[in-house]
Image: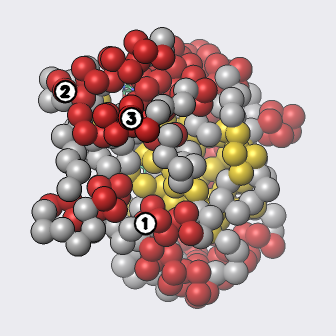
Amino acid sequence: MRTMKLGSTDLDVPVVAVGCMRINRLDGRDAERFVHTALDEGANFFDHADIYGDGACEEIFADAIGMNASVREKVVLQSKCGIRRGMYDFSKEHILASVDGILKRLRTDHLDVLLLHRPDALMEPEEVAEAFDQLERDGKVRHFGVSNHHPHQIDLLRRYVRQPLVANQLQLSITNATMITSGLHVNMLDDGAVDRDGYVLDYCRLHDITVQPWSPFQYGFFEGVFLGSDAYPELNAAIDEVAARHDVSTTTIALAWLLRHPARMQPVIGTMNVGRLRDCCKAADVDLTREEWYALYLAAGNVLP
Ligand SMILES: NC(=O)c1ccc[n+]([C@@H]2O[C@H](COP(=O)([O-])OP(=O)(O)OC[C@H]3O[C@@H](n4cnc5c(N)ncnc54)[C@H](OP(=O)(O)O)[C@@H]3O)[C@@H](O)[C@H]2O)c1
């Protein structure tokens, strides 16, 4: 698997991250097969969150991979906190307690990356800074980042937090590419010009923050997978054509579309199917042409000004 540096760190990470939000759908044996297939493919970066399966996903993962000191050295572990039932919570107390819970469930003494999952309207950046300092001092977290954050919110955090913010996990797929579209329609009167995210893609590139697209195969908000969907006939025809040209699956092409972007993004995949997992990993070796990239973008219903 091709690797890259995560954000401004020296940490080498595979360009495809394995999301574990759905791992609680697998029984023990299938979960084991899944995580070991990922390792065989060089996909050793695993994305978690304390809320996935109410913590069960982290436990299932730790069991499946047989977590111990030597396994721990071979994997890069990222988890997220800050979402609670009916609220978001970036208080120092909640962040510290969440990380202790995550470490216990993952059976490790440290996380490589901790992300703040979704902006908290009541965030006190000074408290986040204190929490990060303590987690770093205690050796519990090596790197910090955010998820679903706007550039201004990141700037607010950066004013108080000493550690670099190295990743921003955001919803992005060919069918949900508003952060790309607004950059193409600047200053126009059409809908494409609507700025929903403060040009977060350019911001992250400028500040060495790795964008981690989540739900790279979904349209809407978990409405379904666009591959093979009747809702996207033109897109599927275009993906079929590009897949045939490169002699790979449509899954590979959908992910290669994100990897072709010069922001050097690290998509977080959610499949629990080992065949599709391997297809996702193959995307690291497919280089789409400029013509192919734009053809897929337009086939998804996007327009150029
Ligand atoms: N930061 C956030 O707010 C946030 C939000 C959501 C998710 N995430 C992270 O992002 C990860 C990915 O999210 P996601 O699971 O929604 O992403 P996804 O990869 O777009 O969707 C995966 C789902 O699509 C299905 N699928 C069907 N056909 C597929 C195909 N041809 N190729 C790939 N998948 C296909 C998979 O089923 P099979 O298992 O049967 O293949 C699986 O249920 C999560 O695991 C989590 O780590 C983060």
Badge 2 crowding class, 10 Å Cα cut-off, few under 14, some 14 to 19, many 20 or more, is some
Q: Secondary structure at mark 1?
A: helix
Q: Nearer the viewer, residue 23 or 216?
A: 216
| Quadrant the C terminus occupies | bottom left
- Which circle, 3 or 1, is nearer the viewer? 3
Any part of residue 282 in sight: yes
Which residue carries the number 2 mark?
234
Residue 129 placement: quadrant = bottom right
Please say if the residues under marks 2 and 3 sit with CB atoms less than 8 Å apart.
Answer: no
- Which circle, 2 or 1, is nearer the viewer? 2
Q: Position of residue 287 (x, y in %)?
A: 54, 31
Residue 87 placement: quadrant = bottom left
Q: Position of residue 16 (x, y in %)?
A: 58, 37
Residue 200: numbered disc: 1
The residue under the point 53% across, 53% down is: 263
Q: Amino acid at mark 1?
A: Val
The residue under the point 80% across, 36% down is: 74
Which residue carries the number 3 mark?
291
Q: CA distance from mark 3 to mark 1?
A: 24 Å
Instruction: Looking at the image, tell me whether mark 3 or mark 1 is earlier in sequence order.
Output: 1
Badge 3 crowding class, 10 Å Cα cut-off, few under 14, some 14 to 19, many 20 or more, is few
The residue under the point 24% across, 20% down is: 237
Any part of residue 54 in sight: no
Instruction: Looking at the image, tell me whether mark 2 or mark 1 is earlier in sequence order.
Output: 1
Q: Amino acid at mark 3?
A: Glu
Badge 1 crowding class, 10 Å Cα cut-off, few under 14, some 14 to 19, many 20 or more, is many
- Asked if residue 163 is positioned above or below residue 81 in the image, the reply reads below
Q: Secondary structure at mark 3?
A: helix
